[in-house]
Amino acid sequence: VTLYQYDVCPFCNKVKAQLDFLGIAYDVVEVNPLTKSELGFSKEYRKVPIVIVDGEQINDSAVIMREMETRMKKAGLRGRGARPRPGSAAAKKEDEWFAWVDSRFVHVVTPNIYRTWEEAQRSFDYITERGNFNWFMRQAIALSGAASMYVISHRVLKKRHGIEDERAALYEALDDWMQNAVGPKNAFCGGSEPNLADLAVFGVLRAVKTFDTFSDAMENTNAKPWYERMRVEVGEATR
């Protein structure tokens, strides 16, 4: 399995959380966000994540996660991450909250990591450590990436998703997740073990664990116990 990614991309980190949870070994290729030259094999689809599995290209984080789940089932490896029975209440709940991650949660988290210019700059620090880029390219990516995402976050994303206060929107989303997805009596959205929605939310949060966004979220919501349970279940990031 080879994953083409941006290191802090929430969609990429959803996939990594699932792969880590399932114990699937994988390699990562850090994609240059300016040139995307690493995606030369994919002429029509130019986004990340892309996964290559046994020579087959799979696009889009949600599709990748469903496909990996299906492949594990076909291989007879159904212990961890086995899908609820189709049509069951558990399956409908998983589908609802798995979709919520892409339709709402990711778009709430993203403006938070670009909330200030300093935070936007820190979000591109990874480029100095990841990827086979020369010094000049790394500086260009870091500066142009931070500047463009700071502007896009403030002028486009917040308006598009009805966000006025980034942190307040994040806390509200996590409170919604904890109250209505996980619930007071369950360890996870999936009940006694994580489901795809748990893995997706965890992956998005793990992507920003070194940022102020993460520490503020853990301090101002009741999501920390759930996150710590997920960290134990998923294990440390292998990539």
Image (spheres, rainbow, N blue to C red):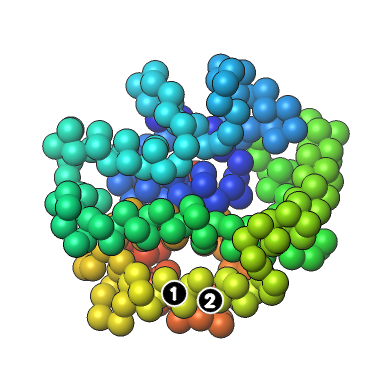
Give how far across and how far down residue 4 sits, in percent: 54, 33
Amino acid type at circle 1 is Asp
Say above or below: 165 vs 121.
below
Q: Residues within 10 Å of mark 2 (few under 14, many from 20)?
A: few
Camera sees residue 135: no
Amino acid type at circle 2 is Glu
Write down the residue under mark 1: 176
Contact between marks 2 and 1 (CB within 8 A): the answer is: yes
Q: How many marks?
A: 2
Helix, strand or loop at mark 2: helix
In 3D space, how far apart are the residues under numbered discs 2 and 1 (Cα atoms)? 6 Å
Q: Quadrant of the N terminus?
A: top left
Say above or below: 45 vs 145.
above
Helix, strand or loop at mark 1: helix
Q: Which mark, residue 193?
A: none
- Quadrant of the rendered image containing residue 234: bottom left
Residue occupying the point 85% across, 34% down: 136
Residue occupying the point 61% across, 50% down: 8
Write down the residue under mark 2: 172
| Front residue of 125 and 202 | 202
Say above or below: 14 vs 222.
above
Q: Residues within 10 Å of mark 1 (few under 14, many from 20)?
A: few
